[in-house]
Amino acid sequence: MKPINGRFTRRTTFSLLVGLLLAVLLLWTQGEWLAAQEGEPQAQDQSGLTESMQRMLESNLPAENLPPLGATPCVAGMAGPYPCNDVDLLAFIPLATFGASYGADIWGWTDPLDGTEYALISLDDGTAFVDISDPVNPIYLGKLPTHTGSSIWRDVEVYANHAFIVADANGSHGMQVFDLTELRDVVSPPVTFSETDHYSGFGSSHTLVINTDTGYAYSAGSGTCNGGLHFVNIQDPTNPTNAGCFSADGYTHETQCVVYHGPDTQHQGKEVCFNSNEDTLTIVNVTNKAAPAQLSRTSYAGSGYTHQGWLTEDHHYFLLDDEFDESNFGHNTRTRIWDVSSLDAPFVLDYYDGPTPAIDHNLYIRGNYVFESNYEAGLRILDLSDVANGNLSEVAYFDIYPSGNSPTYNANWGNYPYFDSGVIVVSGRQQGLFILQPNPPLNMATLAYSPGVVGATLDLGQTVTGTLTVSNTGNLTFTFTISESQPWVSVSPTGGPLAPNESLALDVLFDASAVGSTGDYSTTLAFGGDFHNWVNPAVLTMHVTEPSGSTLYLPTVFHDDNLAAGLTLSLGGLILLPAVVTLSILALRHRRR
């Protein structure tokens, strides 16, 4: 470049600067576009709504003007006006009773004090609480109003006798906390409740899931953490605190977080979240809240909008619903079966297509059954006993929207199938609360045991016997087995048949003569058999001392939200510490959408 009179012209210098700025802008724009293509889908438009939420608004219908209904059995394929198969209507409460225009998500709570069951239904203007201890005569107890304005997206979860509530597209709503024990003392229902506490670490949140084993809540789709998971420590329910983020894969629509006990030994015992991230299943180790680690990010053929999913109880398979594939590709309701035996390399094993073209929204798993809320097609119950071969089969249903089964976003939003009574509560977006019961009852062979830990302190060379009680809390007879391999402990009997509501006391013999020195010894008892639920191994511990006396004790107490007290162990004339808990695997922990 030649200078004029020994200098560059101002025009030349200006042109160079403009060209340089344009080049930098172009490179930056390309980098942002590539990032979006490679792992961070642009989840929300300028209105803050995801494409899924926009489609819901486009097909939204007003509330139906429906009367309440009492118990109506399913006869010849109909329960009153509702198509059905082997599911009875116990009661229906319309939205008008709650003073609401729309329903959303639903969950349940069982009072540990007396076993009373409650339905918690999210509404556009708050959350309603219904006593269903007499399910054919439910009692609407009252409503907790929204923290801010109305929203058709509201979610509720339960931990430690408290409800935790979030809402989307709803400004500074945050997370409401409500003490559910207030439901015990409602004198003149319905009443207006007040929130017990409030968490303002985020504003809007699309969904919420709680891992009741660890006491952490996970907000998905909030305005924080790049739309990814926002961790909240709720171990003290009335003092929720920010515990971190996972933002590396952008927007998360739904998640399920568990203490993993599946076949991938590398990750057993770790807290793992299975995220539905719009176009992928993204699996994240969140054990260390300060440094969550993405284990895998996997797309799949025919994806439309990866919406939600749930693990089988053995954590071997993950069933996933995609919210756009029915309308985008024209096939019937499709449930994808993922094999997650390797968390680093999950894959789609197969898929199940249902009998209607309705959109699948939220699904949950209990025992050998899948409970799907498929919008216009209502509640669909699938048998997954042959899931290892990629097979699911429909065994029952209740259609809350007789007018059609189109792939739109109307009718059944969610369900809660975890009550011990077998009652299932279902929420209808334009309808209200349906209280249902499969008839005949679903085949549930369910094993429970207590206490969770049996331990002994004894002198070197001595023996002592404790008791472990195994129960059948389901409705089918099953045969169980127990396996243990340590020479210092033996169990008798090592198995046998159990009829419904039957219990069997097992003798656990601790033998300190089988070890050569003092110290602490520990092992587990693994349960096998043809029951349907996942059962954690029982823990046995032995503390061997120099000769001084023998005592049977419970060094650790397992607890859950359905605490059952009162078991006392005895050993000859010795006074033994009471066991204060029954570990009930029926009290499953879940979360949704």
Image: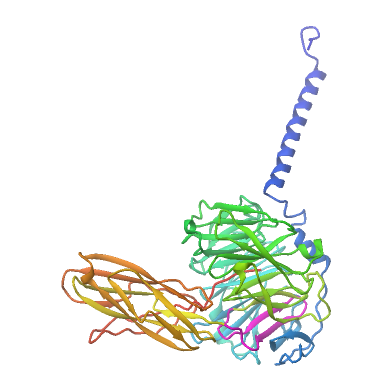
Taking the spot 63% from the left edge, 72% from the top edge, the residue there is 364
Taking the spot 82% from the left edge, 83% from the top edge, the residue there is 65
Displayed quadrant of residue 430:
bottom right
Q: Is residue 444 magenta?
A: no
Displayed quadrant of residue 570:
bottom left
Left/right placement of residue 110 relative to residue 522 reads: right
Left/right placement of residue 579 relative to residue 571 reads: right
Left/right placement of residue 214 relative to residue 365 reads: left
Residues rendered magenta in the picture: 418-443
Q: Looking at the figure, which quarter contains the N terminus?
A: top right
Q: Looking at the figure, which quarter contains the C terminus?
A: bottom right
Q: Is 264 placed above or below 376 here?
A: above
Q: Residue furthest top?
A: 5
Q: Residue furthest left?
A: 547
Q: Is residue 428 magenta?
A: yes
Taking the spot 80% from the left edge, 69% from the top edge, the residue there is 407
Q: Does residue 173 appear in this view?
A: no
Q: Is 278 placed above or below 456 here?
A: above
Identify which residue, 359 or 341, lies in the foreground.
Answer: 341
Displayed quadrant of residue 579:
bottom left
Q: Is 309 placed above or below 122 here?
A: above
Q: Give percent across and percent down for residue 230.
A: 59, 58
Q: Give percent across and percent down for residue 494.
A: 37, 79
Q: Does residue 363 appear in this view?
A: yes
Q: Is 542 placed above or below 203 here?
A: below
Q: Give percent across and percent down for residue 268.
A: 47, 60
Identify which residue, 556 or 23, lies in the foreground.
Answer: 556
Q: Give percent across and percent down for residue 590.
A: 57, 71
